[in-house]
């Protein structure tokens, strides 16, 4: 549980033995800690030696309010509260932290990364809406990987436009034949592989941007 103000957020903390970093998930609209796609990615990251926190950024009653579902400022606030929680939790204290954003969660992740650059070491987006971070994009310093499905044409355009505004180390990877949810055979596995490689590269305590 992560408490921020009067709100208590439910989460699932996954801890491999001797984690080399921790990844906080920012889910998209209508999704949460039980998202099967993010759970799959989280399991891959754990197998690769990274701790993960799958967190509901909204309480149940809040999730029914569409205004809050798309309130990027609010979601970024919640991510920063969870970031603070991870920095004080004995199991994750001192670990480098990354954000994994999906859909609208990407906008919140990038805004939070821009607002607290000293706390966030890397960002990965899956089928995300980085454009929702708006004016915060040029302020992001954490190396950012944007992953988009090759058949997700509107989102490809949004990600290319956002990539041009990012001034941090950055990369856009388009997965051929994949649609927005990466439901095609092998597509989600490719996302998880790319995310693991990016996070291991940037979150490892003995890494300066090289291989893990």
Image (tube, helix red, strand yellow):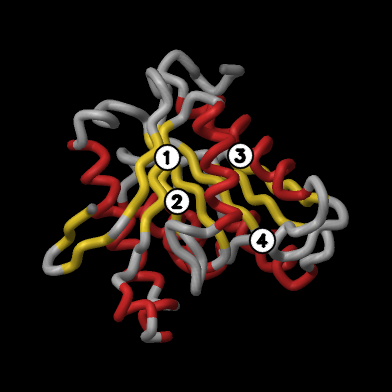
Q: In this view, does 13 lie to the left or right of 94?
A: right
Outermost residue toward the right in this view: 177
SS at badge 2: strand
Identify which residue is drawn at 49% across, 67% down: 31
**Viewer-side label of 1, 4:** 1
- Counting residues from the start of the chain, the first of labels 4 and 2 encountered is 2
What's the distance in space between the residues labelled 4 and 2, CA to CA?
A: 19 Å
- Counting residues from the start of the chain, the first of labels 1 and 3 encountered is 1
Near mark 4 (Cα within 10 A), the count class, few <14, some 14-19 or many ≥20, is: many
What's the distance in space between the residues labelled 1 and 3, CA to CA?
A: 12 Å
- Cβ–Cβ below 8 Å for labels 1 and 4? no
- Cβ–Cβ below 8 Å for labels 1 and 2? yes
Q: Determine which residue is flagged by label 1.
A: 52
* In-front residue for pair 67/139: 67
- Counting residues from the start of the chain, the first of labels 1 and 4 encountered is 1
Q: Determine which residue is flagged by label 4.
A: 159
Checking the image for residue 25, the label placed there is: 2
- Cβ–Cβ below 8 Å for labels 2 and 3? no
């Amino acid at each position: 549980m992560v408490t921020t103000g009067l709100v208590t957020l439910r989460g699932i903390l996954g801890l491999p033995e001797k984690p080399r970093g921790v990844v906080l998930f920012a889910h998209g609209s209508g999704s949460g800690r039980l998202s099967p796609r993010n759970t799959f990615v989280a399991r891959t990251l754990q197998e690769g030696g990274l701790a993960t926190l799958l967190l509901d950024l909204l309480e149940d009653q809040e999730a029914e309010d569409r205004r809050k579902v798309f309130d990027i400022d609010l979601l970024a606030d919640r991510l920063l509260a969870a970031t603070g929680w991870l920095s004080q939790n004995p199991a994750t204290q001192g670990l480098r932290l990354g954000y994994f954003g999906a859909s609208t969660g990407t906008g919140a992740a990038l805004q939070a990364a821009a607002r607290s650059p000293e706390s966030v070491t890397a960002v990965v987006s899956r089928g995300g809406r980085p454009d929702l971070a708006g004016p915060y994009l040029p302020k992001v310093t954490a190396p950012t990987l944007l992953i988009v499905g090759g058949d997700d044409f509107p989102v490809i355009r949004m990600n290319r436009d956002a990539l041009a505004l990012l001034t941090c180390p950055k990369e856009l990877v388009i997965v051929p034949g994949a649609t927005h949810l990466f439901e095609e055979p092998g597509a989600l596995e490719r996302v998880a592989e790319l995310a693991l490689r990016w996070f291991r590269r940037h979150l490892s305590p003995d890494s300066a941007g090289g291989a893990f």
